[in-house]
Image: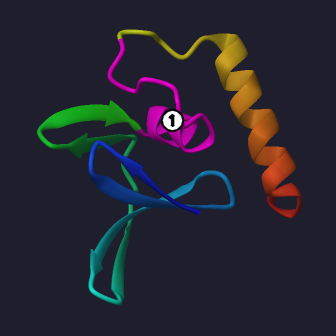
Amino acid sequence: MIFDVNGVHFRLFYGDELYLVRINGRTENWKKIESSQVTINGKKYAKTRIIYKAFNARWDIDSDERLSHEMLTDLNYMIKMNYPNHH
């Protein structure tokens, strides 16, 4: 699934493999994100926030809201439901 966070495209595989996607016409270049933080337009985000945003498009990633235990539990459930053979 390709999704957008503040104008930057990402692709999610297996629920926890995150790739930065640069789209140039019909060509997509992917770069796997190995670190736990990602910089988007000069602002750092935890990788889990970006993955949570992939499953919750209406959630404001720029809010001061921390990912609660319940939110992380929901995220793990969504990953298992969408990628059942990989976890």
Q: Any magenta on residue 30?
A: no
Going 24% across and 33% down the picture, which residue do you hit?
44
Residue 39 location (% of width, % of height): 22, 43
* Colour pattern of the rendering: rainbow
Q: Which residues are magenta?
A: 47-63
Pick out the residue farthest to the bottom.
26
Q: Name the spot of residue 17 as percent of width and height, x first.
A: 56, 58
Q: Residue at x 66, y 52 (%)?
A: 15
Quarter holding the N terminus?
bottom right
Q: Residue at point 47% right, 12% down? A: 66
Q: Is 18 located above or below residue 71 in the figure? A: below
Query: Residue 20, percent across and down?
Result: 36, 62
Which residue position holds label 1? 48
Circle 1: residue type:
Thr
Is residue 57 magenta-colored? yes
Left or right: 19 as drawn, with respect to 12: left
